[in-house]
Amino acid sequence: MVEALINSPADGTTPRRIADAYVHSLAELDPLTAVYLGLGPEDDDRLPDLSPAGQEAVAELARRTLAELDAVEAAGGVTDDAERRCARLLRERLTAELAVHDAGENFRAVRNLGSPLHGVREVFTMLPTETPEHWALIGRRMGRLPVAVAQYRELLTEGVERGLLSGPRQVVTVVGQIEEWLTGDQPGGWFGEFVQDAPVEQRAELTAIAVTAAESFAELRDWLRDVYGAAAAGRPDTTGRERYARWVRYWTGSDLDLDEAYGWAWEQFHELDAQMRAEAEKVLPGSTPMAAMAWLESDGPAIKGEENVRTYLQGLMDTAMADLQGVHFDLAEPLLRVESRIAPSGSAAAPYYTAPSLDFSRPGRTWLPLLGRDSFPVWDLVSTWYHEGVPGHHLQLAQWTYVADKLSTYQVTLGGVSANLEGWALYAERLMDELGYLTDPGHRLGYLNAQMMRALRVIVDIGMHVGLEFPADSPYKPGEAMRPDDAREFFGRYCGLSVDFLDSELIRYLGLPGQAIGYKLGERAWLRGRAAARAAAEARGEAFDQKAWHMAALSQGSLGLDDLVEVLAAL
């Protein structure tokens, strides 16, 4: 239990106390938030209310919180820089979230990752499983899945009635994901397989619960395919500029100049293409980058077997942690633990990270989707795990957790800005290249390919949703409008990812408009902030202390791109 980390709003109300009261109230409304943060009571077996009423309750909490913030600011209750920074973040984040809610985007929540449906399944991977009591709690929570699924269907049904639907590609993809969740060697598919780790005397009861849960997902699959899919047929998969700009604010904390960002990403594309051609020559003389990456994928070093690749990735993080600690970072003991895990079947293609609970009882974890594979080429895994684990997401989010009581819990959890987080993780990959960890030509080509993927994300995400043209210097269809099929073809020509991964990525960009641009644009902000801090130190006649800068930067809590460069430059 970590309620002690949350400031009480009862005495001397300030923005930080308002922000932390919001965290506590949202954890009461949304049990998934409580699980993720480690805030809920130990016997809590609830799932969130996914119905329109449940969504509106969350929005109303945000409105009340903004009203409290207004009152404190009007009364002069913002007394120092720390309070002002928290107030600015809280206002910006809640305002951006309400803009998305009020536009009815929640009614379109059919996408291949990050939807309410994914949340109520993935929560089980975050629950403790050490005792029979833990498994009994899992059984009670899993028993609530049919209600949660019905509420989600109610939400989507209202979206159909309002004409607020997801695009047809998302529907087809989610139907396929649910089908995969329901497939397996055990009754109840993934749910049945999950409970097989329970004590023998509990398995029969838990399996029956899992089967009932799976049946509710099967009914939803059929409804999505036959009813929702018919309603969504013929609708655009893209958003248009107005909807896209709203989402960009949500994901980046900034009203970005989309045309400037699009042009800058094309500059990055040409620079990275030249670097990749040079590196490909080292991997396979006389080859193109795509040919060299194809060779690495088919004939390069690979890890065989699920447990072996999990162990390999754990070793990458352990080595990076040991090498960086005390030299480039100064980490507290709780941060030194991070776990490599295998993602649940039916996940999207991209690896991901989950942060530790606020009391570190659940450590940070990286997750690798298997995608039906048993062999894992390592050329692109190395840089990816520097991104997902150490020094990427784990160091930032675990450090945020460690300093939660010095800022506010909100600033290091729910107030997180995607572009800040993903920008740091991409900066972390670049840092490891700068420090000489990517000298192997295959590993470095994997790093450059990851950089290229993030530049291409800016290009295709903005281009598709806003309806821009391929520029005159594009090697692919110059002067033609960018449509999803063209974007997918262009992406595949210049990024060495598997066909399945590329297809999953395209669906991701269409379902989460604006999210994918935050990686490269966020890294740009981190690099600009570091460059400005170094220049300021040199102007003072001082050496730039990168270790101290890293720790100060990682201890600021969340910042949107509107504020990030300025704050980093002053450290």
Image (cartoon, rainbow, N blue to C red):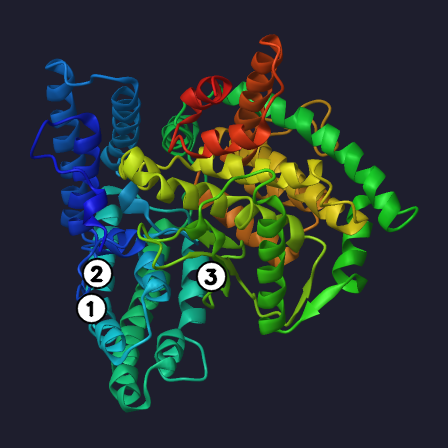
- 506 vs 453, left or right, is left
The amino acid pointed to by label 1 is: Arg
Q: Which residue is mark 2?
A: 47
Q: Nearer the viewer, residue 71 or 97?
A: 71
The count of marks equals 3
Q: Secondary structure at mark 2?
A: loop
Q: Secondary structure at mark 1?
A: loop
Cβ–Cβ below 8 Å for labels 2 and 3?
Answer: no
Establish if 547 lies above or below 165.
above
| Mark before the other along the chain sequence, 3 or 1 | 1
> Which residue sits at x=45%, y=34%?
554
Is residue 514 visible in the rendered image? The answer is no
Say which quarter of the image contains residue 60: top left
Establish if 81 lies above or below 476.
above
> Which residue sits at x=28%, y=44%?
106
Residue 526 location (% of width, % of height): 54, 27
Q: Which residue is mark 3?
A: 347
Q: Residue furthest left?
A: 10
Establish if 513 lies above or below 74.
below
Q: Residue furthest right?
A: 286
Establish if 459 lies above or below 280.
above
Counting other residues with Cα less than 10 Å from the Cα at mark 2, is it few (<14), some (14-19), or many (20 or more)? many
The amino acid pointed to by label 3 is: Ser
Counting other residues with Cα less than 10 Å from the Cα at mark 3, is it few (<14), some (14-19), or many (20 or more)? many
Please give the label number shown on residue 144.
Answer: 1
Which quadrant: the N terminus? bottom left
Counting other residues with Cα less than 10 Å from the Cα at mark 1, is it few (<14), some (14-19), or many (20 or more)? some
Q: Nearer the viewer, residue 408 or 46?
A: 408
